[in-house]
Image (cartoon, rainbow, N blue to C red):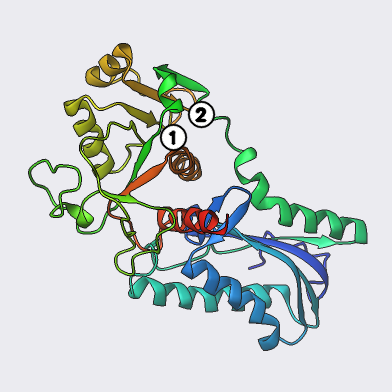
Amino acid sequence: MSNPLRNPNIDYERGWFSVTFQVAFNKSVFGAVVGEACELNALGLAVNEAWLSHPAHTPGLYIDEFRLMPNHFHAVVKVDGVSLSFVIGKFKSYTNHLYLEFKKSGRCIDIGPRLWQSSFYDNLISSHEELETVRKYFRDNPKNWNNDRFGPVTTYGVGNAELLSRRLVAFVASEASPGTVAGAPREWGDPTAVGGGPRECNLEAPAHSGGGSFEASGHCARGEERPVISTFTSPEERDMRARCLRKRRAFIWVCPGGIWEPLPPAVAKACEEGWGFVCSPVPSGTGVNKQRAIWCNQYVIKQAAGVWVGAIRPGGSLETLLRAIKGKERSK
């Protein structure tokens, strides 16, 4: 059966092509876009290196501009006597093997048995001008990643927006936190808490080698009254929001999927009394989008003077985001 995505009038064994293919289920497995760069995690770096070495194992293949993004891959290639489908199929097969090895050892998230969607998109490049246009589009892909998708995080807001001007502490934890257990409410900084408890993280500190968590350089002083900012999405984050409400600690809730309607009564009361602020880049009821959630977490971390880190899933986008931001802080 012929592939409906291939043009029968094109010779796919010779010429310049742009190709794009997606991760299975459109999952973000290779890292996260931070600022105007795509910061790759360990799996992303391995896949990136596999593409760079592809021509050495595939005679007739020449690679040009390419970009590995969190959930897809763009590349410009020249083929001479080798089928484009063979080139892409060979790369997908090898990187799928890499993914399975990473998954087996717990170094990346599990998206099922396959890394990639079944086919790919191609376009024959017929002029130098078109080649330059494609090259620029691929180079600019990380820069346009968020600009093409989202408005300001505070486009919609309820409560005291002045809280954003105060010295904040962020709290982040993965949605599928490993080893999560039920139990009595935990105090901030309790060493028996899941993942070692929320720990204030100096962005200069090196990453912890186990479990994807990050070392704490300070401590969670109970006397400090810095507002807590978070997306409050994961179970640990929602638990933190509940404790903020219980202790009347000021908080900022960044909602990736739109502000809840109606707001939970305790949250609405905090907003009315001036110690709560809820904001979102999208209208109520929009629903959570994975890339918008990553972008909102990036905003949360960059707004804060310190970060409390709960359980972080190894190989996930949140781990990559924290590492990338810490690296940028160290280079300043």
**Quarter location, residue 266:** top left
- Whether residue 75 is visible here, answered yes or no, is no
Q: Quadrant of the N terminus?
A: bottom right
**Category of crowding for the residue at label 2, using alpha-carbon neighbours closer than 10 angstroms: few (below 14), some (14–19), many (at least 20):** many
Quarter-of-image position of residue 212: bottom left
- Numbered badge on residue 281: 2
How far apart marks 1 and 2 lie (CA) works out to 7 Å
Q: Secondary structure at mark 1?
A: loop
- The residue depicted at 87 percent of the width and 56 percent of the height is 130
Instruction: In this rendered view, identify the residue nearer to me: 275 or 183.
Output: 275
Left-right relation of 125 to 281: right
Query: What percent of the width, then of the height, locates residue 27?
Result: 47, 55
Instruction: Tell me the residue that label 1 is attached to.
Output: 256
Between disc 1 and disc 2, whose residue precedes? 1
Residue 16 position, x and y percent, is: 83, 68
Q: Quadrant of the C terminus?
A: bottom right
Q: Is residue 82 above or below residue 219?
A: below
User: In the rendered structure, are the residues bearing label 1 and label 2 in contact, judged by CB atoms less than 8 Å apart?
Assistant: yes
Q: Is residue 192 left or right of residue 231?
A: left
Q: Is residue 325 left or right of residue 136?
A: left
Locate residue 292, reporting x and y percent: 49, 40
Q: What amino acid is labelled 1 in the image?
A: Pro
Q: Residues within 10 Å of mark 1 (few under 14, many from 20)?
A: many
Q: Nearer the viewer, residue 233 or 219?
A: 219
Q: What is the residue that sits farthest to the top in this orientation?
A: 272
Q: Does residue 23 appear in the picture of this structure?
A: yes
Q: Residue drawn 72% across and 51% down?
A: 140
For the point 66% across and 81% down, the residue is 54
Point out residue 52 in the picture as x, y percentages from the top left corner. Answer: 66, 77
Residue at point 28%, 41% (across, down): 237
